[in-house]
Image: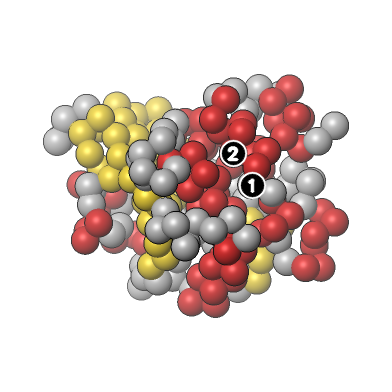
Amino acid sequence: MSLVDDLIKKGYLKTPRIIEAFKEIKRVDFVLEELKNEAEIDAPLPIGWGQTISQPLTVAFMLELLQPEPGDKILDIGSGSGWQTALLAHIVGEKGKVYAVERIPALIEFSKRNIKKYGFGEKGIVEFVCKDGSKGLKEAAPFDKIIAGAAGEKIPQAWKEQLKVGGRLVAPVLSSIFLLIKRSEKEFEQKEFPGFAFVPLIED
C-alpha cells in the first residue's frame, strides 16, 4: 500500500484537494539523495543542519487542520526541505501565494532546488524569505492561513496579529499541535492536539 493510501485508510487524509496534493507532490523529491529509498516511510528524515523533513502523518494532520484553499495567501514558517511548501502551493494554485520562511540559507537553496521540479517559483506561487520566522512576515501580512513546522514554547504574538479575521493558524507548541481560528481582532478559538514531536523553533 502506498504511503498516501495508508494515510487515507488511517483517517489522517480526508479532504480531496489535500489528498490530491499528496499524490501529485512526491516526498521523494524533497529528501536527501542517500535517503530516497526511505521517502515512502511514515517517519521524519534528516535533511541536514539539524533539521528534518516532517513525518507524513504529521504533515497530513496539520494540513487537514489548516484547510488550505485555492487562492489562499499562506505563511509557511520553517519551510525546511520545501515539501510542505510545495503541497500548499499545489493547493492554493496560481491565484494563491505561499511565503516560505526559513532562517538557514543552505536549506532555502535546497528547497528552491526541490521545488523547481514543480515550477511553483517560476509561476510566482512560492516566494522564499530567509529570516527568523518567529516574527512572521509583516510586509506580506495579513495571511489567510499560517503554518509552522517547528515548535516554540508559545505561539508568537506576531503570528496572531498577521492572521486575517476568520483565518486559521496551525503550529506546534512543545509536543502539541495547536489550531487557532481568529474570530475577531482580539479573540481566538483554540484547540490542542497533544502527542507530537518537532524540532525546536530557533529565534535570533
**What residue is rendered at 79% in x and 46% in y?**
41
**Residue 41 seen:** yes
Which quadrant is the N terminus positioned in?
Answer: top right
Counting from the top left corner in percent of width and height, residue 195 is at 59, 36
Classify mark 1: helix, strand or loop. Answer: loop
What's the mark number on residue 25? 1
Image quarter of residue 30: bottom right
Q: Residue furthest bottom?
A: 106
- What's the amino acid at mark 1? Ile
Q: Quadrant of residue 72?
A: top left
Q: Which mark is residue 111?
A: none
> Residue at the spot x=54%, y=51% of the render?
86
For the residue pair 51 and 85, the one nearer the viewer reads as 85
Residue at 64% across, 47% down: 25
**Percent from the top left, x then y, of residue 202?**
44, 66
- In the image, residue 197 sits, relative to residue 99, either above or below, namely above
Q: Is residue 99 left or right of residue 159?
A: right
**Type of amino acid at the residue the image marks with label 2:** Ala
According to the picture, the residue beneath numbered tag 2 turns out to be: 21
Q: Is residue 138 above or below residue 14?
A: below
- Give SS at disc 2: helix
Marks 2 and 1: CB-CB under 8 Å?
yes
